[in-house]
Image (cartoon, rainbow, N blue to C red):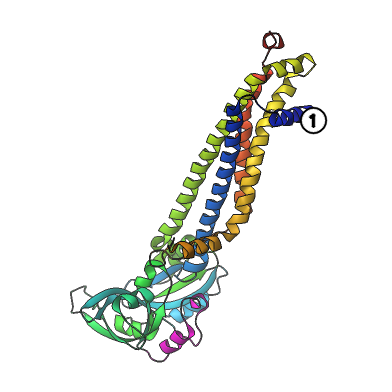
Amino acid sequence: MNLSLQLARRFRRGKSSNRYISFVSLSSTLGIGLGCFVLIILLSVMNGFERELRERLLAIIPHAELFSINQQGIVDWREYQQVLGEDPRIRKVEPYTKITGMIQQGSALKAVELTGIQINAAIPTRWQNEISDADWQLLREGPNQVLLGKGILNKLGLAPGDKISVVIPSVTEDLTFAAPKNLYLTVAGSIQVGGELDNLIGIMHLETASEQAGIKSGAQGLRFQFYDPFAAYSIIREVGYGFPQAVYMSDWTRTQGHLYDDIRLVRVVVYIALSLVIAVACFNIVSSLVMAVKEKQASIAILKTMGATDSQIRNTFVFQGLLNGFIGVFWGTLLAVITAPNLSLIVAKLEDLLGIKVLSGDIYFIDFLPSQLQANDVLLTVLVAIVLSVLATLYPAQKAAAIQPARALH
């Protein structure tokens, strides 16, 4: 075994006459371990939020939209639906018409954004977790059936079978004011997406929506689902600029992009903050080694008189500091790797036990704490902690190598 490593292990196991040195050494190990544990856990949570954003929210809302600039709508939309659907980057293209209005229920009013889509026999794949089969079948029973967000139903006290009146603006070609009109619909069921969307959205038949909105072609626009939702910005602009009709373009980053930006920002802040926590813990390695060098001056001098080189003495204290760092990194990382995949279950158990809710489904788009452990995060955290531990040993190790035997043994 390497002489420097043997000496480092002996110095570390040996009892120090100064208990404060042992305390500082232990605190550095615990600090590094705790920093690695918390950093990996929080990065896993950020990964979980990003996964849920991609698989849950972006599976429901359209990744991008093209919609007409006037009441004409998308001319020959069936042809464009077929042609654009052949693009290998596009998963699905569907027509839609959107109506914004106010639901009037007694004396209560609630804003709603109704989207008319093609109602087929089966629930679209992306809606299967948010809409029940029974509600979908009720929606198919008539052109005036509508599905409303769960939050709307709760606020207005509505149930399937209730009749509602939706006040929608009347659009004129010359942009003059006209009296609003009432659209009478029957509640078929609910949509439960989570977060603020439950308080706004509704789904109805495309034909009814287009008729009420005065869309002559039968579809106000086209909605897109891409295989890579994060490429929506560039793809929709490529499609829109080449579209033969004047249209507006929009993508999910304009409406829901703040969620993704928030996740990325928090991820960066968390990484910087907890890397600094690990760095502070590594400063304790500096303190403990400096004191250990002062305490071991006589031993270092004797080793030098026996032929130990400056390099061997330097490496001895580098290894001693690294042992503290390695132990902290190992246990902190091990606990994080065990905890992160089970974090959602652990938090759910704590919520049941304490009677609290960490995330409310009425506010956020999910009602649980997600977690997804990624090997890259673990490796990067370990690498940062080890590098900081190495840097923390350099000054004390150099001080040890510079000790003169004649002065130390005087």
Q: Is residue 267 left or right of residue 207?
A: right
Q: Is residue 140 above or below residue 355?
A: below
Q: Position of residue 96 (x, y in %)?
A: 40, 77
Residue range in magenta is: 120-143
| Quadrant where the image shows the C terminus | top right
**Callout 1 amino acid:** Asn
Q: Which image quadrant for residue 8?
A: top right
Q: Where is residue 62 in the image (x, y as percent from the top left)?
A: 45, 70
The residue lying at 34 percent from left, 82 percent from top is 209
Q: In this view, does 74 lie to the left or right of 82?
A: left
The residue lying at 72 percent from left, 22 percent from top is 313
Query: Is any atom of residue 235 visible in this view?
Result: no
Secondary structure beneath dot 1 equals loop
Residue linked to disc 1: 2
Q: Which image quadrant for residue 382?
A: top right
Whether 137 is among the magenta residues is yes
Q: Nearer the viewer, residue 314 or 236?
A: 314
| Quadrant where the image shows the N terminus | top right
Q: Which of 395 and 170 is in front in this view?
A: 395
Whether 206 is among the magenta residues is no
Q: Is residue 177 left or right of residue 236?
A: left
Q: Nearer the viewer, residue 207 or 282?
A: 282
